[in-house]
């Protein structure tokens, strides 16, 4: 099998990892990214007086995130990994209660002793039960109530599930909930300098291997050539490739290759709803959350689902001495928050931020940032895996691997890396099989 010209559409972790693997195998890789930066949802920005980059959406790794940790080691960045044990709390009746260990569950005042016992059984079951596909045909709500009971459901899980998925909450598969609990570790990892460190090193490796990366480059259409391969159209420019990998969100992928949406297997992807991730980041003179890294907000009157104090996870000295806090939401298409400016959103959020910390005022805020990750959250409804086709498509030489394909996990850099590796492997295997078939056919005709 000779060297192939391969186009990868999308410069997030899936596209970069696939590109790296394919370039290592001797192929000519070209990555197209419409944004001026790489990294996708793990994109990091840096202010003038900061030493480190910060992700637009909160990021961390679990200590068992083996795929991305292996990649970090492969890139020679193992000394950049930081492991720490931050505090996760839950807002209940206006107070923050640490709720990230069995001991803290015992101390939590919102549940009766029996409900605490049933919650422990639920969490233990999810940690130990390995057969997630058996849970795909029942709802998370049914599983939680059946094992954990109504009190824990109403106190903790229902506000979080409905806060995130809203109208979709009653249809969320128990396998999705299993994945959220089974993978969790008490200690978390971060990368010195932010996830940008990995993105930058990965892109440098691809370039050194002969790959080409274009940012601020929007692909208009992708057409199958009559003879062989594809034409990728960028404005008035056309570039030819032997294979194409789409790592962009499904609705955008279908707009580039409309015939793909007509295939029986891929048509099912159009039935998957998506939510958009929105984060408002505040840089403040003093901390908004004292000691707490992650705060789950179970009070549904609040306009945000989670408050995440990054500088209670990493040291504020690397961010110019500022305290950095995310306020996050998952929003459906057309939600009014998506059309708001950061000033309008801050005005909406400020009364609730003051409830978290009464000493907070607008004067305490030195900078603010607003980010939206479109199509960031595929909604895993009952029977989700049956909607996901193979990475190969009916169009020979065209492959697709985006967040919809990550299951039972729903997103995350670790799974994006695994998907990128799997996509590269699939492309190489398919090409080898095609070459072998072609050779055998020619030999038999002699």
Image: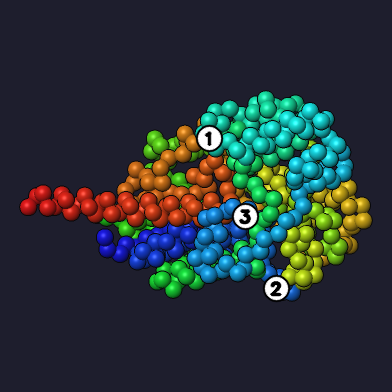
Q: Residue 243: name its quadrant.
A: bottom left
| Contact check, label 1 and label 3, Cβ < 8 Å | no
- Which circle's residue, 2 or 3, is located before the other in the chain? 2
Give the CA distance from mark 1 to mark 3.
22 Å
SS for tag 2? loop
Which tag, 2 or 1, sits closer to the chain's start? 2
Tell me the quadrant of the picture where the N terminus can be found.
bottom left
The mark lying in front, picked from 2 and 1, is: 1
Q: Is residue 176 left or right of residue 431?
A: right
Q: Is residue 268 visible?
A: yes
Q: Mark 3, residues whose alpha carbon is within 10 Å: few (<14), some, or many (≥20)?
A: some
Q: Residue furthest left?
A: 446
Residue occupying the point 49% across, 49% down: 402
Residue ID for mark 3: 63
Q: Which mark is residue 131?
A: 1
The residue closer to the viewer here, 105 or 179, is: 105
């Amino acid at each position: 099998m000779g060297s192939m010209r391969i186009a990868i559409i999308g410069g997030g972790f899936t596209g970069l990892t696939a590109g790296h693997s394919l370039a290592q195998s001797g192929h000519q890789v070209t990555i197209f990214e419409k944004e001026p930066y790489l990294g996708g949802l793990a994109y990091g920005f840096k202010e003038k007086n900061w030493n480190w980059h910060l992700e637009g959406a909160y990021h961390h790794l679990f200590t068992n995130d083996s795929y991305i940790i292996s990649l970090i080691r492969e890139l020679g960045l193992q000394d950049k990994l930081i492991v720490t044990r931050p505090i996760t709390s839950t807002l209940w009746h206006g107070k923050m209660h640490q709720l990230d260990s069995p001991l803290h569950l015992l101390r939590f005042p919102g549940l009766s002793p029996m409900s605490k016992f049933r919650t422990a059984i639920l969490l233990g079951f999810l940690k130990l039960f390995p057969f997630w596909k058996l849970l795909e045909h029942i709802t998370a709500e049914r599983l939680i109530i059946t094992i954990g009971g109504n009190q824990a459901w109403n106190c903790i899980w229902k506000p979080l599930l409905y806060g995130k998925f809203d109208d979709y909450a009653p249809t969320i598969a128990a396998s999705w909930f299993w994945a959220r609990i089974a993978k969790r570790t008490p200690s978390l990892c971060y990368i010195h300098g932010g996830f940008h460190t990995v993105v930058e090193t990965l892109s440098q490796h691809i370039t050194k291997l002969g790959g080409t990366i274009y940012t601020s480059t929007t692909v208009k259409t992708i057409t199958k050539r009559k003879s062989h391969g594809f034409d990728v159209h960028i404005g008035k420019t056309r570039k030819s490739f032997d294979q194409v990998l789409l790592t962009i969100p499904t609705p955008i992928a279908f707009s580039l290759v409309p015939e793909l949406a007509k295939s029986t297997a891929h048509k099912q992807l159009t039935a998957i709803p998506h939510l958009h991730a929105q984060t408002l980041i505040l840089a403040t003179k003093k901390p908004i959350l004292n000691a707490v890294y992650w705060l789950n907000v179970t009070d549904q009157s609040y306009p945000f689902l989670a408050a995440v104090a990054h500088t209670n996870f990493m040291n504020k000295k690397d961010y110019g001495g500022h305290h950095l806090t995310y306020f996050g939401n998952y929003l459906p298409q057309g939600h009014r928050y998506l059309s708001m400016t950061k000033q309008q959103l801050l005005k909406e959020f400020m009364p609730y931020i003051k409830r978290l910390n009464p000493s907070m005022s607008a004067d305490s805020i030195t900078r603010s940032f607003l980010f939206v990750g479109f199509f960031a959250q595929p909604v895993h409804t009952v029977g989700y895996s049956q909607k996901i086709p193979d990475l190969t498509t009916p169009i020979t030489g065209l492959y697709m691997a985006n967040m919809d394909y990550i299951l039972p996990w729903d997103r995350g850099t670790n799974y994006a890396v695994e998907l990128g590796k799997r996509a590269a492997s699939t492309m190489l295997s398919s090409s080898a099989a095609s070459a072998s078939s072609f050779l055998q056919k020619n030999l038999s005709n002699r």
